[in-house]
Image: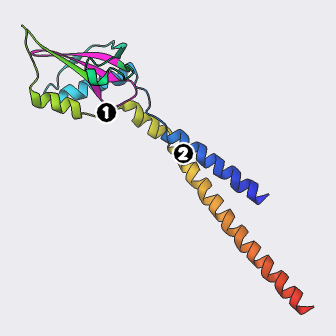
Amino acid sequence: MMRRCVALGGVLVAAVLIGACTGRAPMTAQDARTFTAKAVARIGYPGAIVDTQPSRTRYKSPDPRFQADAPVEVWQTRAVVPDGEVELYVQRRGDSAVFVRDTRTGGGRLLSDDQFRALGKFRLNPADKRRRESQRVPGVLGVALVVIAAASVFATVLTGAADRRQRIHSTRRR
């Protein structure tokens, strides 16, 4: 009976851990807007106006090195800044932009090379944060189950050792 409880506890712990560790949480349209606002603020446009309705689409890189790759599910967002606009294709299941298009009012490039690099390094996924917060309780329960399972195994081992010693002593006395 004890072994079944330990096995069940192990299965429950594994299920909790697998659920907590699989993939990234998908971004909502609002998450993509938050990503865009914070990304363009990071490169020097804190007052950017981000479109309220990002478009749900797919992005396929034109680079020949990536032609075999499947298209990436993205949110297409647009931020209006004082000198033009910045369009970002934000991964739906990720934490970065996969494509940036910048347009200066009147034509030409808007962003510097440093700003492009900063956008390439920017990481944020508000959905992952919400997911981590929602998994706190299952995580604590998982740890508690591990502790209970370990204590049960330890107690079973000690009890079994004591029973074996008792049998050995009782057979010697006869």
**Tally of marks:** 2
Against 1, residue 94 (above or below) is: above
In which image quadrant can residue 160 be found?
bottom right
Q: Secondary structure at mark 1?
A: loop
The percent position of residue 145, horizontal first and vertical second, equals 62, 54
The percent position of residue 8, horizontal first and vertical second, equals 70, 50
Whether residue 166 can be seen here: yes
The percent position of residue 104, horizontal first and vertical second, equals 9, 13
Q: In the picture, which quadrant includes the N terminus?
A: bottom right
The percent position of residue 66, horizontal first and vertical second, equals 31, 24
Query: Residue at point 74% right, 58% down?
Result: 3
Q: Which label belongs to residue 72?
A: none
- Magenta run includes residue 51: no
Query: Residue at point 50% right, 44% down?
Result: 136
Q: Which label belongs to residue 124?
A: 1
Q: Are marks 2 and 1 in contact (CB under 8 Å)?
A: no
Horizontal side, residue 72 vs residue 98: left or right: right
Q: Which label belongs to residue 17?
A: 2
Whether residue 43 can be seen here: no
CA gap, disc 2 to disc 1? Answer: 23 Å
The magenta stretch is 75-98
- Magenta portion: prevailing SS class: strand
Q: Nearer the viewer, mark 2 or mark 1?
A: 2
Observer-nearest of 88 and 128: 88
- Magenta run includes residue 85: yes
Against 143, residue 70 (above or below) is: above
Q: In the picture, which quadrant includes the C terminus?
A: bottom right
Inspect the image, locate mark 2, and give the three-letter code of the amino acid beneath it: Leu
- Badge 1 crowding class, 10 Å Cα cut-off, few under 14, some 14 to 19, many 20 or more, is some
- Residue most extreme to the bottom: 173
